[in-house]
Amino acid sequence: MTNIVFVGAGSVRYTIKLVGDLARTEELHGSRLVLMDIDEERLRATEVLVRKYLSELKAPFLVESTTSLERALEGADFVINTALHRAPGHEDGYVQYEITREVGERHGYYRGIDSQELNMVSDYYTLSNFNHLKMSLDIAKAVERIAPNAWILQTSNPVFEITQLVKRLTKAKIVGFCHGYAHVFHIAKTIGLDPERLDWQVAGVNHAIWMNRFFYDGKDAYPLLDDWIEKHAKDWKPRSPWDVDFSPAAIDMYKFYGMYPIGDTVRSGTWKYHYDLETKKRWYGEFGGIDNEVERPKFYEQLRATRRRLLELAKEVEKDPSLELTKVWPEVFSTGKESVEQHIPFINALVNGRKARLVLNVENNGTIKGIPDDVVVEVPVLVDKEGIHPERIEPDLTDRIKKFYLLPRILRMEWALEAFISGDVRVLQEILIRDPRTKSYEQTLAVINDILNLPFNEEMKRYFLKKSDINSK
């Protein structure tokens, strides 16, 4: 019996998506699923919906739930970590992010201090995110202690920093997951290519991956992409705030770096694209992308509305077990093919030898030339019973991608981990001093002080002020 643990199972919709993938993977039928969350209401709702969904899909699994991490990890083979730290009294972790962002903006940091050069995605907090980083590290240490042979499938952001942190400070087996690679298929379909006939690779670090190989029926497909851009790019309009694959920003990055940016990479460019909302709209279309002060709050409200509806639906199922989830809400409780998430193919490859080509966050170890071996990179890999085998990256990424994008992004990861590990608030000050939005040293002191004094950051404040000269008030 394979034991699969969902930590943060109260992230109901994401858990449901992965459970759907499990249900469609017959080799894993009969596995034990342990749902773990500290929120009893959400945990109960998730269990009700998971059991009902599996029943409708006629997929036999042993389902348990617990609020105890230690109990959940007993006998674990795989730990899917979707948990997001949430302070007491707040509906979700995103509330903390929004409050922290508002503090930053009051001090002149548009979109908050965590919006940094080449790291603009709205939930990718690396500097003020002590609570979430510590929780993620604590989960990894618990896995190391209780289930040392288990794999951690790191899912919640920041995937890059968390996976790297766990690699540095524990012996736990961890791999980072992201679905941004799938934008390759959207690009292919848009320019009229069959994704099944592609020979492709992407490489970089999480939220910073580039399409280094793009062949179609054995021939270089980049000329086809160039032709589409020349003929159609001027008429491009976004269908939603998330639709940025062919935005002026994406094409501008392609022309400068020499390879096409994939997925969240387009959203994580330089300040050139992000100075203010007007600038964002110029580069990302009428919505300005998803990472701005108008569209991001709307998205958070959509997430909350979906979660509330799922909680209500669980109560309805308990009252009326005949209710069919796949008919009531087929967009969530799908009966179709697997999602683009890679967790279940990864598990099935290791357990049953069903080989899978995936794009995962693993230690570099020479995979991308010029990047330190111990840095976690996002690259195509083959997974089988023997483990994870990174592909040879061919052709290599361009020098500009490495020198102007990857190495600076990796340096920011190192800075963020240095701040977290050292507990020296002066590291945060030095990071902000290098921020183009900073006008004075006093500005950095003021914004950090106000963030540390937020009610949910008491532990962070105690930790960081131990080596600080900041006058806490």
Image (spheres, grey):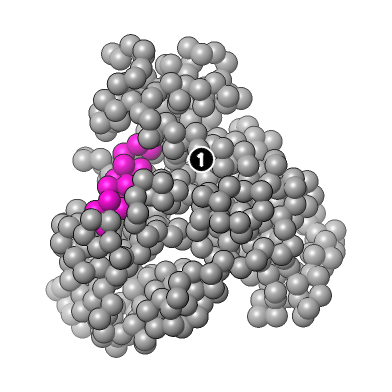
Quadrant in the rendering for residue 95: top left
Amino acid tagged 1:
Met
Quadrant in the rendering for residue 349: bottom left
Identify whether 296 is placed above or below 345.
Answer: above
Q: Which residue is rendered at x = 65% and y = 80% of the image? A: 196
Q: Label 1: how many residues lie within 10 Å, few (<14), some (14-19) or many (20+)?
A: many
Q: Label 1, on which residue?
A: 413
**Start-end of magenta stretch:** 128-143
For residue 331, side relative to residue 47 (left or right): right
Q: Give percent across and percent down for residue 228.
A: 81, 64
Q: Give percent across and percent down for residue 187.
A: 68, 65
Q: Quadrant of the N terminus?
A: bottom left
Q: Which residue is rendered at x = 51% and y = 22% of the image? A: 430
For residue 426, side relative to residue 10 (left or right): right
Q: Give percent across and percent down for residue 96.
A: 34, 38
Task: Provide the major secondary structure of the magenta segment.
Answer: helix
Q: Quadrant of the C terminus?
A: top left
Q: Give percent across and percent down for residue 207.
A: 56, 51
Q: How many marks?
A: 1
Q: Is residue 25 magenta?
A: no
Identify whether 417 is placed above or below 68.
Answer: above
Q: Is residue 142 magenta?
A: yes
Q: Is residue 126 visible?
A: yes
Query: Tag 1's secondary structure?
Result: helix
Q: Which residue is rendered at x = 43% and y = 78% of the image? A: 385
442 and 337: which one is in front?
A: 442
Q: Which residue is rendered at x = 66% and y = 76% of the image? A: 195
